[in-house]
C-alpha cells in the first residue's frame, strides 16, 4: 500500500531537515535558502544522534522532511553513520539526502554515494557561489524533480 | 674257482681226475695267464690311462697356473682399480671440500641477501607508513582547515557585500586583505590535497606518453595561445605509469615554462625523449628566465617559491607534485644548466617498475 508522504504541487511547502553543527554554516545555509526566494520550512539539528531521533519520531508520527541536508563532520554520531541509518531504515530511506560538506576529498564523495547519498555538494569558499549553488539546488529539487515520494513499505533498498 | 674244486671232489675216476685236474690246472693256468695278460693289459691300459691323466693333470696344472697367472693379472687390475677408486675418493673428498666452501659462501650470500631484503622490507614499510601518514595529514589538513577558513572568507564577503555603505574605505581595504589571505590559504590547501592525492591516485599501467602530452597541451591551450608559445616535441614513447598523472607532469612543466618567460620573446618549449639503459629520459626545455643554480633543488620542495606573488603567482605546489609523480613511477627528476637562457627539466621513467 502506498500513502503519499508529501504532495508535490504549488500548495506544498517543502520542509528541510538541516543537520549541521557549525552555527556559521547554519546561518549561511538559511541565508542561501532565503536568497533563492523559494518557499520552504526547516528544522535544524546540531548533532547526528538528535537528527536520527527527530527523523524516527517524525516517521512514527507520520511526518518526515522532504529533504535532508547533512554535514559529514558532526558530533555524537558521524554524518556517514547518520546516512547509513537513514538509508537502512524503511521508514526513512525514501528521503533524498544531500551531503553538504567542506570536504573536496574524493574518498568522502565516493563514500557518500556508496552509502546511498542522493547528492554531494561541497560548500564553496566564495559565498556568491554558495548562493548560486542553493539556487540551482532548489530549482531542481523543489521545482523540477517529479519524483513521487512514497511510503517506506514500498521502498526497497538494494 | 671254488666251484671248480667242488666239482673235482665229486669226480669218481682218480686218474682221469688227476689228468683232468692237471688239465684243469693247465686250463686254469692258461686262464690265469689269459687273465694275467688281461690284467697286464689292463694295467698297461691303466698306466696308459694314468699317463693321460698325468698329461691331463699337467694340463690342469698348467691351466691352474694360467689361471693363477690370470689371477695375478686380475689382482694387478684390481689393485689398479682400487687405487683408482681411492684416487677418485680422494678427489671426491677434495671436491667435497670445495663444495662445502661454495656452500658456505652461498649460505653466507643467502644470509646477506635475507638481511638486505629484511632491511628493504622494513624500509618499504616505513616509507609506506610515512606516505600513508602524509596522505592522512594532508587529507585532514585540507578537510579540517577548510571549514574555519570558509567561515572567514564567507563572512568577510557578506560584510563587504552587505555593509559597504556603512563602512569607510579603510575598513573596506582591511576586509579585502583578509579575503585575499583566506583565498590564498584556500589555494594552498587545495594544493596540499592535490599533492597528497598523487600517492594514492591511479594504477600504473602501460601508457602512451604522447597521449598524456596531448591532453596537457589541450588543457593549456588558452595559455599557449595568449603567450604565442611555440611547443615542439620528439616522438614520445609508451611507458609504464599513469596517464592522468603523467599528463599533469607535462602540464605543470609546460605551464611553468610559459609562466616564467622573458618579456623579450615568445616562449619556446621543447619536449624531448631519449632511450637510455634504465628506460626513457624526458626533458622539457624552455627559453624563459631560468632558475638560479643555487635554487635548483629547492624548487621541488612543496610550497617553495622563488618569486614574490607580485612577480609570479602560484602556490609552490606544481613542481613538488611533478617530482612526486615521477618518483611514484620509479624515476628521478632534476634540473640541469643549459647553455643559453632558460631552464631544462629532466625526468626518467624506468622500463620496469
Image (cartoon, helix red, strand yellow):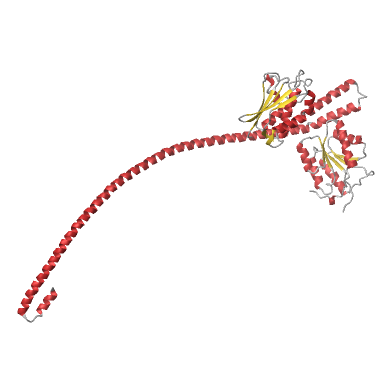
* Residue in view at x 77 percent, y 32 percent: B142
Figure quadrant of the C terminus of chain B: top right
Tell me: A158 left or right of B167.
left
Q: Quadrant of residue B235?
A: top right
- Residue A75 at x, y percent in the picture: 80, 38
* Residue in view at x 62 percent, y 29 percent: B276
**In this orientation, does residue B177 appear?**
yes
- Residue B331 at x, y percent in the picture: 65, 30
**Count of numbered marks:** 0
Q: Quadrant of residue B244?
A: top right
Figure quadrant of the N terminus of chain B: bottom left
In the rendered image, the residue lying farthest to the left is B15
Q: Quadrant of residue A38?
A: top right
* Residue in view at x 81 percent, y 32 percent: B147
Nearer to me, B317 or A85: B317
Tell me: B348 left or right of B229.
left
In the rendered image, the residue lying farthest to the top is B264
**In this orientation, does residue B195 appear?**
no
Tell me: B6 left or right of A56.
left
- Residue A49 at x, y percent in the picture: 82, 42
- Residue B225 at x, y percent in the picture: 79, 26
Nearer to me, B325 or A84: B325
In the rendered image, the residue lying farthest to the bottom is B12
In the rendered view, would you say A19 is above or below B51? above
Amino acid at each position: 500500500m502506498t500513502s503519499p508522504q508529501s504532495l508535490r504541487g504549488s500548495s506544498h511547502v517543502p520542509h528541510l531537515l538541516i543537520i549541521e553543527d557549525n552555527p556559521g554554516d547554519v546561518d549561511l545555509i538559511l541565508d542561501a535558502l532565503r536568497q533563492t526566494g523559494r518557499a520552504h520550512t526547516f528544522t535544524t539539528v546540531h548533532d547526528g544522534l538528535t537528527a536520527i531521533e527527530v527523523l524516527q519520531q517524525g516517521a512514527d508520527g507520520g511526518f518526515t522532511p522532504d529533504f535532508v541536508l547533512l554535514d559529514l563532520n558532526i558530533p555524537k554520531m558521524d554524518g556517514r553513520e547518520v546516512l547509513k541509518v537513514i538509508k537502512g531504515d524503511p521508514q526513512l530511506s525514501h528521503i533524498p539526502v544531500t551531503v553538504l560538506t567542506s570536504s573536496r576529498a574524493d574518498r568522502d564523495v565516493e563514500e557518500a554515494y556508496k552509502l546511498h547519498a542522493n547528492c554531494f555538494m561541497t560548500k564553496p569558499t566564495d559565498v556568491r557561489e554558495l548562493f548560486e549553488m542553493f539556487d540551482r539546488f532548489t530549482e531542481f529539487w523543489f521545482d523540477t524533480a517529479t519524483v513521487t515520494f512514497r511510503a517506506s513499505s514500498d521502498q526497497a533498498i538494494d | 674257482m671254488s666251484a671248480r674244486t667242488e666239482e673235482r671232489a665229486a669226480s669218481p675216476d682218480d686218474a682221469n681226475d688227476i689228468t683232468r685236474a692237471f688239465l684243469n690246472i693247465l686250463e686254469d693256468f692258461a686262464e690265469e695267464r689269459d687273465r694275467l695278460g688281461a690284467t697286464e693289459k689292463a694295467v698297461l691300459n691303466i698306466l696308459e690311462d694314468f699317463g693321460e691323466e698325468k698329461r691331463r693333470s699337467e694340463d690342469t696344472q698348467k691351466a691352474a697356473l694360467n689361471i693363477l697367472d690370470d689371477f695375478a693379472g686380475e689382482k694387478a687390475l684390481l689393485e689398479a682399480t682400487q687405487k683408482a677408486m681411492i684416487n677418485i675418493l680422494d678427489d671426491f673428498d677434495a671436491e667435497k671440500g670445495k663444495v662445502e666452501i661454495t656452500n658456505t659462501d652461498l649460505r653466507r650470500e643467502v644470509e646477506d641477501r635475507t638481511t638486505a631484503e629484511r632491511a628493504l622490507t622494513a624500509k618499504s614499510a616505513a616509507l609506506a607508513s610515512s606516505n600513508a601518514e602524509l596522505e592522512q595529514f594532508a587529507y585532514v589538513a585540507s578537510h579540517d582547515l577548510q571549514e574555519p577558513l570558509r567561515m572567514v572568507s564567507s563572512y568577510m564577503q557578506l560584510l563587504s557585500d552587505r555593509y559597504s555603505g556603512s563602512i569607510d574605505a579603510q575598513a573596506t581595504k582591511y576586509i579585502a586583505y583578509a579575503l585575499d589571505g583566506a583565498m590564498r590559504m584556500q589555494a594552498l590547501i587545495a594544493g596540499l590535497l592535490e599533492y597528497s592525492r598523487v600517492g594514492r591516485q591511479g594504477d600504473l599501467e602501460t601508457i602512451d606518453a604522447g597521449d598524456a602530452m596531448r591532453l596537457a597541451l589541450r588543457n593549456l591551450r588558452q595559455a599557449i595561445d595568449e603567450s604565442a608559445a611555440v611547443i615542439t616535441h620528439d616522438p614520445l614513447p609508451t611507458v609504464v605509469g599513469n596517464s592522468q598523472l603523467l599528463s599533469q607532469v607535462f602540464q605543470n612543466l609546460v605551464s611553468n615554462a610559459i609562466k616564467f618567460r622573458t618579456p623579450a620573446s615568445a616562449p619556446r618549449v621543447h619536449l624531448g625523449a631519449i632511450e637510455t639503459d634504465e628506460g626513457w629520459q624526458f626533458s622539457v626545455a624552455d627559453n624563459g628566465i631560468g632558475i638560479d643554480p643555487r635554487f635548483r633543488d629547492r624548487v621541488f620542495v612543496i610550497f617553495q617559491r622563488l618569486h614574490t606573488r607580485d612577480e609570479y603567482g602560484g602556490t609552490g605546489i606544481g613542481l613538488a607534485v611533478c617530482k612526486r609523480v615521477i618518483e611514484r613511477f620509479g624515476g628521478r627528476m632534476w634540473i640541469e644548466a643549459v647553455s643559453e637562457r632558460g631552464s631544462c627539466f629532466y625526468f626518467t621513467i624506468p622500463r620496469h617498475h
